[in-house]
Image: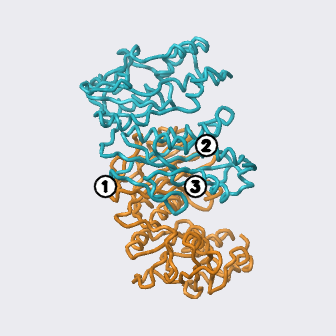
Chain colours: A orange, B cyan
Amino acid sequence: MKGTVGELGEFGLIKELTSRLTSTPAVRIGPGDDAAVVAAPDRRVVASTDILLEGRHFRRDWSTAYDVGRKAAAQNLADIAAMGAVPTSLLLGLVVPADLPVTWATELMDGIRDECQVAGAAVVGGDVVRGEVITLAITALGDLRGHEPVTRGGARPGDVVAYTGWLGWSAAGHAVLSRGFRSPRAFVEAHRRPEPPYHAGPAAAGLGATAMCDVSDGLIADLGHIAEASKVRIDLRSGAIDIPSQMHDIGQAVGVDPVQWVLTGGEDHAIVATFPPDAKLPARWKTIGEVLNPSGAPQVTVDGIPWHGGSGWDHFGDGS
Amino acid sequence: MKGTVGELGEFGLIKELTSRLTSTPAVRIGPGDDAAVVAAPDRRVVASTDILLEGRHFRRDWSTAYDVGRKAAAQNLADIAAMGAVPTSLLLGLVVPADLPVTWATELMDGIRDECQVAGAAVVGGDVVRGEVITLAITALGDLRGHEPVTRGGARPGDVVAYTGWLGWSAAGHAVLSRGFRSPRAFVEAHRRPEPPYHAGPAAAGLGATAMCDVSDGLIADLGHIAEASKVRIDLRSGAIDIPSQMHDIGQAVGVDPVQWVLTGGEDHAIVATFPPDAKLPARWKTIGEVLNPSGAPQVTVDGIPWHGGSGWDHFGDGS
């Protein structure tokens, strides 16, 4: 595949992109008609949209097109899982500059397709438009399979707070990359290609989760959304969160307390949820705090003390 | 509402935009959580995405923000109707420059909301991102209400071709605007704010439509999609298409044969469909041609003669 998107033309590019796609039994009508048709056996559909711009949300010199695709799809599919639903499908609106190599676009599509497959979903439609800045507009759809959706608003005092997936890995990888390093590879990879625990969203709904969201802005910030929507205080026990020794090593090398990454780093798309105190959580869920009556405004505290993201960040001497 | 999007900030803007929205009984969870939840009683969901850029798809000096919103929503909702489905909801990804007046964004939202209401749908979610070029990424969802989706691929020789809605009005309005005029108002309005016959899509499915699409690229082009997908020839009778006298007047004033606008003008989002020859079509459907066995490649003919968009266009002396 040689040449630029401008040379290939919009029609040729769409043909090239759709030819790479795979399908699932849920896809009743895929790309190419006025609209796609996807199974929604639950009689409700879960839908989420994100828009990503080059320079702001990804960099072509830091990530391959394939990884940009994986990450962009993961970000949206994780939102579906975080409602307790199973992702079924994804639509892609794509703005491409005329001088973009066709291979960049096809590798992006491969990444989106593969991440969809990981989550059990398929790309069912989209739109391609010529423009100056590479822009991805992704909409993901999902099915609740009979579960009630788990919102941010259902946490109750007495509930426990637990998460599954990865916390702080992407932020540690970002710190490594922004200092010009390419290793440790596991963290750089985590930054380039997060691995949301898709299965855990619907599983949490089945376990009776009262509130849930994916960790995209950082644990404190996202639990803050739950605290606010549920009108509760959430208290975390900092000692309960596992910090791998390698993350400590990176922290020492770059002068950052890794607790920082774990509490405020986003983009790993871990899933954090609140459960009734008697919920039997599988080993992959780590209990890290509890839900309390709010004393004053809803907020998140760490070891009983209000966490101030900004100053906390500054305190650790890293303003990046 | 004063100031720019940059002054208000992303969070403030999202709050301002969502505060203007209305809901419907189909909306189970609206904006503000990880994802929206919308009723899909048919157990299938219809979904379509379009991306629109300032300068390419709309101009701020030609259309108000409100009209841009109406038109952008209409374009997507019409795709849902053209599958035979009832639009239920819409998601909006929005890129806004920092210096954009907040009022432009809120009026855009008002337009999207109002067009959704016309179609019976509601805005259920979205994303707002700062960027250089105003970009709208719209995804519309719909419900089939027990009808089978009407694709482009089901037209059969012997079927009749019929349309409902408006043809050529937007193109005539565009011709008026591009010559610096602001009237006749009805055509300028049709360009700024198309009125797709949303109800006609599901109605056509109920009437037994064998193939259907909305007219976004132009009647010939869109029937060409049906001809290709159905592997048939479609022959139009040019005399069967109503051309209002005022459109003739504009044609004379700007030196364009209005048949041109009717056959090749897009953006009115009329709905064109093929029906079995014995279908009883209500008066709002105008029969304009028939489906034939393809002699050679699938194509669209006018009065039995192949239509060559490009040369036809040139023939009428207008290359705009």
Query: Which residue in the structure is indicated by mark 1?
Result: A25
Amino acid type of disc 2? Gly
Label 2 chain ID: A
Gap between marks 3 and 2 measured at Cα:
19 Å
SS of the residue under disc 1: loop
Image: A44 above or below B262 = below
- Marks 3/2 in contact by CB < 8 Å: the verdict is no
The mark lying in front, picked from 3 and 2, is: 3
**Picture coordinates of residue A244, whole percent (x, y):** 55, 83
- Marks 2/1 in contact by CB < 8 Å: the verdict is no
Pointer 1: residues within 10 angstroms few (<14), some, or many (20+)?
few
Do callouts 2 and 1 point to residues on the same chain? yes
Residue A130 seen by the camera? no
- Marks 3/1 in contact by CB < 8 Å: the verdict is no
SS of the residue under disc 3: strand
**Picture coordinates of residue B180, whole percent (x, y):** 68, 22
Residue B101 seen by the camera? yes
| Residue drawn at 42 percent across, 18 percent down | B241
Q: Quadrant of the C terminus of chain A?
A: bottom right
B246 or B45: nearer the eye?
A: B246
| Residue drawn at 48 percent across, 58 percent down | B36
Image: B99 above or below B231 = below
Gap between marks 2 and 1 measured at Cα:
34 Å
Query: Which residue in the structure is indicated by mark 2?
Result: A131
Horizontal side of A78 relative to B277 (left or right) equals: right
Gap between marks 3 and 1 measured at Cα:
29 Å
